[in-house]
């Protein structure tokens, strides 16, 4: 009797596995918006059989996988834009706006640091940020920490052209671990740490945006090390933006904010911190870019939407000291409250990024105390800033 029951259970289980359909790829890729699109399609590599009707038959899935820590997908638009999805939303792409951000997150600290020999990238994504460091000849060691093994193994190869084949580079080591756990337990110190976590409203991710996490990262930096953090302005409000910036400044008082505003819209930004006050030597950066082995760096910048180093540096928006009044009273996100997770959740349906950026720009002044170099190059940078400011004013 027991044997018959066991066989019946096994047969029933196999039958359920056979008849229950797989999760629609649109749910993995677009989460809650899937209810609007109404697709029931499953993954496949034939575009004509795997289009998502809600997007006017313009996008299809080329990969979907269910990992130990999350489900991931890669989609492609007929225009050629390829996107990596996790947690029901887009996380990275080869679209112009995302490429700018990912290249900023890598190239800014690598060029500002005088000798970026070792780099830690927390969160792999499409691998474009980590791949930016591949172009820099000074980088001798590149560690990528990613919690979901499918991402570096299956997702990053879809973006090899954009990430400079970072997974094949001999300097690259991939660590499959929670980013915070790895930073807490490693004894290694790095010249640069970049952190590109999922949006803070995603459950559990606010722990990668706390003062304690930033302090952990600071403890794993070498004396002149730099931390660079991605932060979103889309699906955000003023309270959330102020909380994100203020929490980072709590750990890194000498912080700089750089804006990714290709179309003068507040989309996202890079926060950069260092133990001591920043001094960015323009002459040193210009001279390095003239070297023959920096050819790939210049091409990587150009492909990312930065035709010159001035266009990259002119994304400077403000330094922490100039934002004191703006940040006063902002909620600090800590391990004890994780308040940012709730603030970000409440502001999820807001699309006021441009208003946030305009509010920050009120405090802009040319950072004479940060940029140093020859008079000619400082003047060139001022002209790049003024040109951008003038165009914004005229519009």
Image (spheres, rainbow, N blue to C red):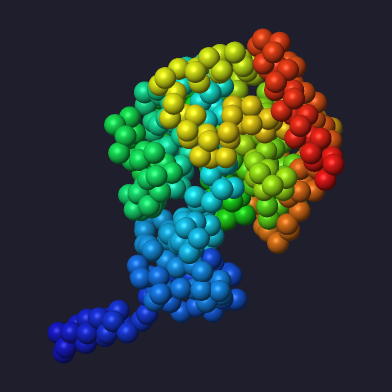
- Residue drawn at x 68%, y 43% as measured from the top left: 261
Seen in the picture, residue 291 relative to 307 is either above or below; the reply is above
Residue 185 versus residue 310: which sits nearer the camera? 310
Residue 293 versus residue 170: which sits nearer the camera? 293
Quadrant for the C terminus, please.
top right
| Residue 64 x %, y % | 38, 64
| Residue 304 x %, y % | 53, 40
| Residue 214 x %, y % | 58, 33
Quadrant for the N terminus, please.
bottom left
Seen in the picture, residue 54 relative to 303 is either above or below; the reply is below
| Residue 54 x %, y % | 56, 75
Q: Is residue 328 visible?
A: no
**356 relative position to 135: left or right:** right
Q: Is residue 108 visible?
A: yes
- Residue drawn at x 53%, y 57% as measured from the top left: 90
Residue 334 versus residue 380: which sits nearer the camera? 380
- Residue drawn at x 53%, y 66% as measured from the top left: 30
């Amino acid at each position: 009797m027991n044997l018959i029951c066991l066989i019946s259970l096994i047969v029933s289980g196999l039958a359920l596995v056979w008849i229950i359909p797989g999760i629609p790829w649109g749910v993995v890729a677009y989460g809650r918006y899937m209810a609007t699109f109404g697709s029931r399609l499953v993954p496949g590599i034939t575009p004509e059989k795997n289009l998502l009707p809600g997007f006017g038959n313009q996008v299809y899935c080329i990969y979907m996988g269910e990992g130990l820590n999350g489900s991931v997908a890669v989609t492609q638009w007929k225009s050629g834009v390829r996107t990596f999805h996790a947690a029901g939303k887009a996380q990275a792409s080869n679209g112009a706006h995302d490429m700018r951000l990912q290249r900023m997150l890598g190239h800014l600290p690598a060029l500002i640091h005088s000798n970026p020999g070792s780099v830690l990238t927390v969160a792999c994504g499409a691998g474009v940020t980590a791949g930016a460091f591949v172009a820099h000849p000074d980088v001798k060691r590149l560690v990528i920490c990613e919690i979901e093994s499918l991402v570096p193994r299956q997702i990053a190869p879809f973006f090899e052209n954009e990430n400079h084949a970072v997974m094949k580079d001999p300097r690259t080591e991939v660590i499959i671990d929670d980013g915070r756990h790895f930073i807490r337990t490693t004894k290694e110190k790095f010249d640069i740490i970049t952190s590109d976590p999922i949006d803070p409203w995603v459950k559990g991710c606010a722990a990668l945006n706390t003062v304690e996490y930033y302090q952990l990262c600071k403890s794993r930096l070498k004396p002149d090390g730099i931390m660079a953090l991605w932060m979103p302005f889309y699906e955000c409000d003023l309270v959330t933006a102020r909380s994100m910036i203020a929490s980072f400044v709590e750990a890194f008082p000498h912080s700089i904010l750089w804006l990714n505003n290709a179309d003068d819209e507040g989309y996202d930004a890079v926060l950069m911190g260092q133990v001591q006050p920043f001094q960015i030597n323009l002459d040193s950066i210009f001279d390095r870019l003239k070297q023959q082995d920096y050819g790939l760096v210049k091409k990587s910048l150009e492909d990312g939407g930065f035709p010159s180093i001035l266009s990259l540096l002119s994304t400077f928006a403000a330094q922490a000291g100039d934002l004191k009044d703006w940040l006063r009273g902002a909620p600090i996100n800590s391990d004890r409250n994780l308040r940012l997770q709730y603030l970000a959740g409440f502001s999820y349906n807001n699309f006021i990024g441009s208003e946030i950026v305009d509010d920050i720009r009120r405090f802009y002044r040319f950072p004479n105390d940060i940029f140093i170099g020859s008079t000619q190059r400082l003047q060139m940078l001022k002209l790049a800033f003024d040109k951008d400011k003038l165009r914004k004013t005229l519009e």
